[in-house]
Structures are given as C-alpha cells and as structure tokens.
Image (tube, helix red, strand yellow):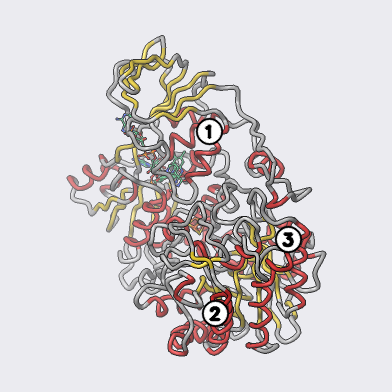
Amino acid sequence: MSALEKYPNLFSPLDLGFTTIKNRALMGSMHTGLEEEPGGFERMAPYFAERARGGVGMIITGGISPNIEAGMGAKLSTSEEALQHKLITDAVHAADEDVKICMQILHSGPLARNADAVAPSAVKSRIAPHTPVELDAAGIEKQISDIVNCAAKAQEAGYDGVEVIGSAGYLLSTFLVEKTNQRTDEWGGSYENRMRFPLEVMRRTREAVGPNFILIFRIAAMDMLQGGMSWDEIVTLAKKMESVGVSIISTHFTWHESTVPTIATMVPRAAFAGVTGRLRKELNIPVITSNRINMPQVAEDVLIRGDADIISMARPMLADPDLIRKTLEGREDEINTCIACNQACLDHIFSGKICSCLVNPRACHETELNYTPTDNPKSIAVVGAGPAGLAYADVAARRGHKVSLYDSASEIGGQFNLAKQIPGKEEFFETLRYFKRRIEVEGIVLHLDTRVSADSLKDKGFDEVIVATGIAPRTPDLEGIDHHKVVSYIDAIKGVKPIGKKVAIMGAGGIGFDVAELIMHKGLSGSMDIDTFAREWGIDFENHPRGGVTDVEPVVESADREVYLLQRKSTPVGRGLGKTTGWTHRIALSRRGVKMINGVEYLKIDDDGLHVMIDNEPQVLGVDTVIVCAGQSPLRELHDDLVKAGLNSTLVGGAFEAAELDAKRAIKQACELAAVV
Ligand code: FAD
Ligand code: NAP
Ligand code: SF4
C-alpha cells in the first residue's frame, strides 16, 4: 500500500482560499535558544531548511517578541531585524517552495522575565519573577500596534504568515481570564470586554497584512486552570476570531502555571485531540491540534476522527527532521521517534541552554554536528548495544565504516530495556525499534549473547574498539547490605525477586523515582490510557468545566504498598530530576502516598528493617524489602585490558563516566565521536 493510500488525510492538501498547504503536517512552534544567540539566525536557517526538505507542509518558528517589554530575547519591530529573518524564509523556500513558514509572535505579558513586564492587571503569576505593571489605555494601544507592526515586519521578511499566541498565560490570554484581568474599563469586566484585546490584535493585524497572509490564532482550548476559561467562552472567542479574519485556529492546552502535565512522556498520545475536535465542529476555518502526536498513524487517526485539519508535531521534528518524508517513502520504521522526555529540548530552554534532542543531538546543531561520508573506512568493533553503543554504531556505519556490534545480552538496548518497563516510559520501545532498524539498514553486524573480552577481539583485525559497556549498580558499604530483603533495582524492575508490602528505596535519583512509580503502579498498562490519565490528573474531558479541571478531584489508584523513598542529601527529594518533568513525578508519587525523606543516614539492615537516622533521631523503618538505587559505577575492565593488549580503545557512555550519566549524554557523546572517527 502506498503512503498516499495509507495516510490519505495526512497527505491531502489544505486549501485556504488564497494559498494551499501541501499536507496536514505542521512543525509546531518551539523556542530553540538560537533566536537570541549571536549567529543564531545563520544556524536557524539550515535547521528549518532541513525540516522543510523533510516534508512538512508548514513550519512555525519559535516565539518572537513584538517589543522589548514582551520579554522574549529576540524582537522583530524594525526592517533591519526583518533582514535577519530573511535568512530563514529564504532558506526554507529554497529548500522547498511549497513549504509555508509562519513566524510566531509571542508577547509574554506577566511571564516576561524583565522587570518592565506588562499585563492587564498587576497580578503576579505563580511562576513569574515579577509583578507586572498594569497597562493604562495608551499602553494597551501601544501593545496592539507593536504586535501589528511585528506581523507587518514578518510579512516584509518573507514569512507566509504569523501565529499569534493567545494562550499559556502570555499577554493575550491574561486579558481573557478574570483572575488576571481585574480591569473595570472597556478592556475588562464582561467577557465581551475581556476578549477585546486579542480580537483587536487580530482584527488590526489582518487589516495591516492584507487578505493573502496566513493568520493563526493560538487559543487555550483547555487552560487547565482552576476557574479558567469555560467551554462557551472558548467557542465564542474562536468564532469571533474567525469573524475578524483569522485563517486558522491552533489549539493549545494548559497555561504554564498549571500543574497538569500536557506533553510529558506519561501523557497518552493525542490525549487532547478530542478537545480540538469539539471546537472544530463549531467553526468554518481549519483547526490545528497538538500534544503527544509523534507518529504518522497517530496523526492520521486524529484526522480520520475529524478532530483536526492540521496536525502539529513540534518535538517530533527535533527528533527526526525527515519524519514526513520517511512516511511518504513507506519507511515509518526508520522514524526516530520523540519519546517526550523533554530532557534536551524544554529542559535546556528552561535552563538557558540551546535546545536539542536526546535521540537526535544534531537538532539545532546542524551546522556543527554532521555525519559526512568518511574517506578512510575503518573496521570498528562496538562493545555494548546500549544507547551509547547503538548511537555510535549507527553514525559510524552511515558514514561508511564497517561496524560490528556486540552485546552480552540477548537483545539490544542496555538499560533502555529496564527504562521501557516503567509505566509512562513506553515510548522507549520506539527508540529500540529505531535502532534495530538502523542496524538492518546500515548492515551493522550484530553479535548478541556475546560477552567480549580483550582476548576475543585481539586477532579480529579491528582498527578501533569502542567500549560502551555501561555501568554496574553501586552497592553501598552498609552493614546488612547482603540481607535477603535487599534487592537491586535491576532485579526489582525485571521482577526477578518479589517485592514486599513495606518497601524502602535507598536513593532518590531518576532510577529511585522510576522504581517507586513501578512498584506503586496498579494494573498492567494505564499509563497510555486517556481515561486513566484524565482521572489521575483531575481532567474532565466530557463536561469541560472551567479550565477543564475546576473542582475535579484527581483519583489515583495505587498498589497496596507503603513506600519510603530516601536520600542522604538535605536538598528536597527529586530536585535533580528534569526541570520540566520532575514536578510531575513528585506529584504522582506523593498522590500515591510515597513518603519522600531527605537527610537520611543509613545505619544497617536486619530482620527488623532499615535502621536510619533522620533529624538526629534513630529510627527503624520496618520494611520487608530494601531496593538499592544508589547510583552507578563505570564498567571499564574491558577497556583497560584492551589498552594493555595494545588495541585502540575508546570509552563512551556510562563506561566513560557514570556520574550524572543519562541517555542524552551517552547518545550525544557517541554521535560526536562517531562523526569524526
Ligand atoms: P548501558 O545502557 O548500560 O549499555 C551497556 C551495554 O553493554 C549493555 O547492554 C550490556 O549488556 C553491554 N555489555 C557490558 N559489558 C559487556 C561485554 N563485556 N561484552 C558485551 N556486552 C557488554 N536516561 C535518560 O536519559 N532518561 C531516562 O528517562 C532514563 N530512564 C531510565 C530508567 C531506568 C529504570 C534506568 C535503569 C535507566 C534510565 N536512564 C534514563 C539511564 C539510561 O538508560 C542510561 O544512561 C543509558 O542506558 C547509558 O547508556 P550506555 O550505552 O552507556 O550503557
Ligand atoms: P543518580 O541520579 O545519581 O542517583 C543516585 C542516588 O543514590 C542519589 O539519590 C544519591 O543520593 C544516592 N546515593 C549515591 N551514593 C550512595 C551510597 N553510597 N549509598 C546510598 N545512596 C547513595 O543515579 P540513578 O538514579 O542511578 O540514575 C542513573 C542515571 O540515569 C541518572 O544520571 C539519571 O539522570 C538517569 N535517569 C534519568 C531519568 C529521567 O527521568 N530523566 C530516569 C532514570 C534515570 P544521596 O547521596 O543523597 O543519597
Ligand atoms: Fe522529544 Fe526528548 Fe528529543 Fe525533546 S529531547 S524532542 S522530548 S525525544
């Protein structure tokens, strides 16, 4: 079956009257950090061009400020600034003249990090550093005309349209909600008045840019705020937007200050598309849906259900710029799927680093990291088929080296085979499927069930040996650590040893949290099920109370266990987890009654349980199981033996350095080394 037969909706063009989008795949807006970086536009041009060549119908850039007070680093208000943007629009249109590129206009309003942040009322957001200054009437007029001017400059820069963000707790959305708009003039009070600002922005923008320019309004179709927007208010706003000349409504879910996860791994695929579908029925213009749509079949299914006209995939386009082209060529099994970890994209952005991707470290580094064909093909042995070994083997082989890949296990994946067992981490299966296919495509010679020693490689004639043997779990030096109630995290995850009803987890790093999720999880799946997800996070998709969540109590089902999650550090438990996802894990575990305790000194383990000192008080946690998640040490023996035997050996991944190791670092290091071998 051809791709056009398999995905007839995804590959059908969308006629906007004055222009046509060639298919229904949109690369959604993502801030990359390059917007503010010196030379960033020179880097963004190839980044976007690569995605245009990769087959999407339309691209939306990261958010650009219309003025200084709007708070994003990059601003577009002058013709000189427009010239910079021309680098992007020219590169995209040169890559494929049929691909549309729109610029997102983002006015942060009260979420701006600068002290001169502005808002309809002086109401500080929970997540903002400052209380914003309340705009007076002249200030409101200025903000509107700055946004309109920004759109006009985007048109001058060669964009095919603009998206104005009217959601997430940014300026336009704060006019809509009573909590953030406490004005009594014509811009506040009744809903009619609260809608006035976003409507004026879009009406005047349409006037300024003329009829043949794509205008997208991003609406909070479910803002996840207690007392947020009602369904009627959302529908009314969307209809009014249609009447003032908006071409497309893009649905967004959540304000940044909400405590409901909307894009993390545990969010089921396309969980929110049904909300878009309901809005779509009320409108005559096309609608975009988004969030956790990461594979073509998921996109096609959303379109078949009639839930949207366009599918926005943002992070999936970081993970694989060729996602749509591969789909068109029937190579879906070669898609490098976004696993929704946020580790290299959003976590980077919120830490002031350049965005990238855990599974594709080239993302946003297209000018720096390239896998060019080698003119000196070598014979390379890669030992260890965990993320580091797999990434190395893949890149080296695609560059033309002859690669043999060894693992003592019976399947590829290393620790990812443990990670994929954790509820909410099912996407890790996709990464393993991707690498399995890459091995086939590149003709990498795979040797499973093969423990490698220096002796076994000595006479094989390899030019290079890459040691990606990973780690060994750390065993704390503690009296009773060999007691029968002590279980390693590996045995706990594999289910090799039974876990009791009262459990202490020693170590509250990423693995300690994952083990706690696993042993408190009830049922087999659940984590990828939309109803369970909605119940656990207090979302009412059916009745859509204000914000989708108002007065909906989360209902969490847990295994019948009492669990202590312990660490020695005095910092809050879970602080080291991902910046944008750590809170979801902390909330999920505390709702399951897991007791998270810091500042613990471990004394001994015996028949009575785990003896600890907490706040200078000796205590016995009367547990029947102690699971050790106390970090890891590198496995380097093979490397040492190879060096002694006079072979060229290079360490990578956990074998190189176990401290603060994660898959992001392992894959990035492997790709960088293989790019130059
Ligand atoms: P490994 O994955 O440990 O792979 C090493 C491989 O080498 C193994 O397959 C092993 O069998 C093989 N091997 C060892 N010695 C030999 C030998 N002599 N001969 C042949 N083969 C050998 N990271 C994240 O970034 N995000 C997450 O969400 C995340 N979640 C995790 C959840 C769990 C439960 C676990 C356990 C880990 C998680 N990690 C996560 C960590 C991540 O999996 C590791 O950082 C990553 O796997 C390290 O990759 P590696 O290739 O260096 O080592
Ligand atoms: P980790 O994050 O380094 O945590 C190890 C834990 O063990 C810490 O809580 C540490 O805290 C404790 N510890 C260290 N030495 C100890 C000792 N001698 N005795 C008792 N406790 C000790 O490592 P990890 O949990 O093993 O995870 C490995 C890597 O996988 C991490 O780098 C992590 O980033 C990655 N990972 C990531 C995710 C994710 O969601 N992003 C999930 C899983 C794993 P104290 O010293 O304070 O007790
Ligand atoms: Fe997706 Fe993770 Fe890559 Fe971000 S870092 S794009 S969430 S795979």
Give the residue at mark 3.
276
Q: Quadrant of the N terminus?
A: bottom right
Residue pictured at 39% horizontal, 51% vertical: 389
Determine the residue positioned at 70% across, 74% down: 248
Mark 3 and mark 1: span between their CA atoms?
Answer: 31 Å
Q: Disc 2 or 3, which lies upstream in sequence?
A: 2
Residue 649 visible in image:
yes
Q: Which residue is mark 1?
A: 590
Q: Please tell me which residue lies in front, 14 or 369.
A: 14
**Dot label at residue 193:** none
Of the numbered discs 1 and 2, the one sitting upstream in the chain is 2
Q: Residue at x 49, y 65 (%)?
A: 133
Q: Amino acid at mark 2?
A: Lys
Q: Position of residue 463 (x, y in %)?
A: 27, 58
Label 2 element class: helix
Q: Amino acid at mark 3?
A: Thr
Badge 1, how many Cα within 10 Å: few under 14, some, many 20+?
A: few
Q: Position of residue 149 (x, y in %)?
A: 55, 84
Identify whether 479 is placed above or below 268.
above
Q: Residues within 10 Å of mark 2 (few under 14, many from 20)?
A: some
- In the image, is residue 531 above or below residue 367? above
**Element carrying mark 3:** helix
